Structures are given as C-alpha cells and as structure tokens.
Amino acid sequence: MAPFRQDSYFIIYPSSQHALVQFGMREETLYPPQYKIPISVYKTGDGKYTAEKEGNQEVKPLLDGQIADLDGFLFFLELVYKSYLAQRSRFGASPEVFDMELSNIPMLLVSHPSWTHFQVERITQLVFEQLQINNFMFLSSNLACSYALGSLQNCVVIDVHANKTDVTPIMDYIQLTHLSGKVKHGGDSINQELAKLLPQWSPEQIEDLKRSPIYEVLSEDAKNTSKLNFQNEEDDGALDVAALVTSDRDTRELLEENEKGKEDQQASNSEQETNTFVDRNGQQVVVGKQRFKGCEELISEISAVVGRVLAKIDDFHKLRAIWENIVVIGGTTEISGFKEALLQQLLKDHVIEEPTVEKTTREQDHYNQATNKKKAKALFSNNVDYVQIPTLIRLAKYPDYFPEWKKHGYSELPFLGAQIVAKQGFGHTNESFYITRERYDRKGPSGVWDVTF
C-alpha cells in the first residue's frame, strides 16, 4: 500500500488533564500540537454523554493518564474527531473529495501503560466502527519518549501527573511495566505546599504563581551564591495580596515601596527579595521567597522511587545506560529548575563514588603495569571501570534539531515521539506497523495485538 499523505495524519495524546491534538503534518519540520483540549465531557440525568455543560454533570474520563470512565473517554475521542470533520466539511469540498479524504486518514493514539487489554480493544472498536477510520496505531507514552530522543534503547521515564508520578524503565526498547513504580504525589502537591506557605492566597492565585516565570526551583549552588538568606524559614518578604486589593493606596505605589532599596532593578529572580507576577484577573501580585519553595518533598519522593525501581534491574551494562538517560515529562517539568533539582537529588541519593583508597590503589597498579612493558603485553586494557552503579547520573539529551519544539519546550515530549513514529509508520509501505481495515475485518479488535513496530 502506498504511504499516506502527511497532511492527513490524525495524532492525539491524552495526557493528565488535556488532549494534545494535531490534524496533518508538514513536510519540512515538526511543530508542537495544534490544539490543547481539556479532557472533560458531561453526562445527562439519564446517563447519556454530551458536550453540553448547562445543567449536566461534568465527567473527567482520565485520571493521571488512567482511564477512569471508559464510555466517557470513548465519547470524548468521537467528539474530537467529528468536530474536526465538521470543520473540514465547512471548507466546501465536494462529497466525493471529502469521502476520499475520510478513507485515507490514519490515526495514532498515544496510550498510557495502565490501559487494560479490554480498554484498548474497545477503543480500537470505536475507531473502526464508529469513526470509520481505516488505519490505526497505538503508541505507549513511554516508548514515544524513547523515539523522540533518537530511539533511546535504555532509559527511565519519569512522568509527573497532577496527583501521582509514574516511573517506568525502558530496556532494549521494551517498557518494563512490571518493574515500574509510582509516587503518590504529583504536581498538585506543589500547590498544597504553597498553600501552607501562603494561607491567605486563593487556589487560583497559587496555581497562577506556579505557572508564572518567577516560580522556580533553586539549586543548592544558587542558594549558596544568592544574597538571600534561605536558612531562615520565616519569610517576611511577601506582600499580602489583600493589601493590593483593600488598600486605599495606589497599587503601583505599594509595589514601588516594596521594591525600594534594590541596588539593581535588573537583578535575577534569585537575587530579589520579592518579585511580581500577574494573575488570571490581571492583578499584579507580589511574592517573597515562597516562590522558590514547594517542590522539595515531591522531588525527594521521586528520587526514592527511581532508586527502588532501578535497583530491580540486574543487567550491569544496561542499568548503567538507564542511569545516564533520565527522561522527565509532564507539565510540572516546565517549572524552571525542576529537572535540574531532581537530577541534583538523584546524584545526592544514589551516585556511588569510589573510595579514595581503592581509587589510589587501582591507579597505582595501572601505573606500575604501564611501566613494565613485558607485563603490559599480557594484561588487559588499563581503562577499568568501577564496578558499582551508578557512578554517573544525567538527564537524557533533548534534540536540538526541531527548532519549533526547542522554543516550545519538551514537557510534552511524547507528542514529539508520536509525530516521529507517525512519519515512520504511516509513511512506510509496511502495513505491519498499524492495524488496517482488512485486518480488523478479519480479526476484529484483537487484531491490534498483532501490530509490531
């Protein structure tokens, strides 16, 4: 079968709270998703699903990547696809052209490892029977990360959701879900910690602070070199937001007074006692050193679970490669300094340094061998690695050859992987990469398990 046209690809990645959707791809480069749609539908009193909000019960079909309401999720997928078709039909294409386009739309759905066989087959049934799509492919979000980073053979994916965090190792391109671990907290735990530090703030203001550019995680080095005192937990540097709302004085006057005394108005965020951001209501809010706090417990818990998960792997060489390719995804990773702080915690908790005495002895032995030419001929290479793992931990290197993604950021990395796989899978004549209409008619929904990529 001839490859599909790239402008007909339909890619959808349902993450924690939003679905990233793209219809069609460009030839020259890969771009971030076109649409970010909240994963939310509504249920009427008689149990029917609808897109109408008025008087109906809101349903969240996905919870941290897991399918909590299968029927609601199926309705959401159908709603997204048919909304796109309705938009295309308004462009004025003739019925014949429109039908031809419909028959050549291949779909790729990024899945979560927790989805059951029954759920996957029900989704497959929806795609072929209700949506009338003729070519379909599933791709695990973890493997999508691997493909996005140049087909990493061995790595560990840390997926930070709203209420929990998944830690899944990948070895030889296979996700080891039986070894995966879960952290009981996710990005929302940061909001809870900030609420303790800023009890007078509303949940909306705390969320706006977390999403603002002034909220960041400082490394220990940054804290040590900063002029601010991070040893004192009592932080009187924040201006109560109520003062901005209730005071008779002008907001600008209050802000200028709070900023008074700074030697350098262009100082970096970590050098300023207070800083400001604009909330969703357009109100300028001042905050103190609380903007550097809230992530410590989450980072510590993630580090502990990563250690427990990777301790189960007994392949020496592959374990070394996994420790050197830490992949961190999720909206929380957009927080400035979060990934670097997590790496610092992993190094602190898990890296193994060779004892000085052993290192000195080993280096001296190698030196003695090198000076004795007769012995050196019979010996192996002097470059002997220290046998305990890990001696090196680092984040996986993100690609720099997708300029639009580089500007956008890589918190939605699985979608980039889905784009790459869609190009390779649907742009190839080998139909074993996805389930076709012919295979579905012959084997039904179970035919999805025959797909190999």
Image (tube, rainbow, N blue to C red):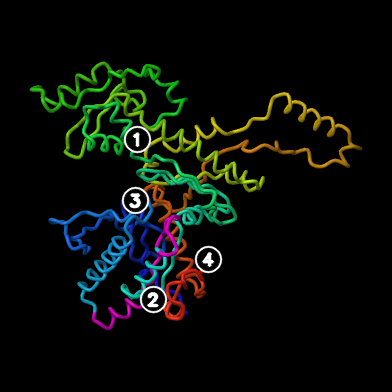
Q: Which residue does the image show at 34% across and 28% down from the upper left?
A: 269
The CA distance from mark 2 to mark 3 is 29 Å
Residue 294 is a magenta residue: no
The CA distance from mark 1 to mark 3 is 18 Å
Tell me which numbered mark, 4 or 2, is placed earlier along the sequence.
2
**Magenta stretch in the rendered image:** 94-118
- Circles 4 and 1: CB atoms closer than 8 Å: no
Tell me which numbered mark, 3 or 4, is placed earlier along the sequence.
3
The CA distance from mark 3 to mark 4 is 28 Å
Q: Considering the numbered disc 1 on the image, is that residue within a helix, a strand or a loop?
A: helix
The CA distance from mark 2 to mark 1 is 43 Å
**Can see residue 418?**
yes
Tell me which numbered mark, 2 or 3, is placed earlier along the sequence.
3
Amino acid type at circle 2 is: Asn
Marks 3, 4: nearer the viewer: 3
Q: Which residue is mark 2?
A: 134
Amino acid type at circle 3 is: Leu
Tell me which numbered mark, 2 or 1, is placed earlier along the sequence.
2
For label 4, count other residues whose C-alpha is less than 10 Å away and answer few (under 14), some (14-19) or many (20+). Answer: few
Q: Which residue is mark 4?
A: 453
Amino acid type at circle 1 is: Ile
Q: Horizontal placement of 130 versus 42: left or right?
A: right
Q: Horizontal placement of 318 versus 338: left or right?
A: right
Name the residue nearer the viewer: 327 or 31: 327
Q: Quadrant of residue 308?
A: top right
The percent position of residue 16, horizontal first and vertical second, equals: 35, 50
Q: Which residue does the image show at 28% across and 20% down from the upper left?
A: 237
Give residue 190's mark.
1
Work out which residue is located at the far right of the displayed protein and give it: 374
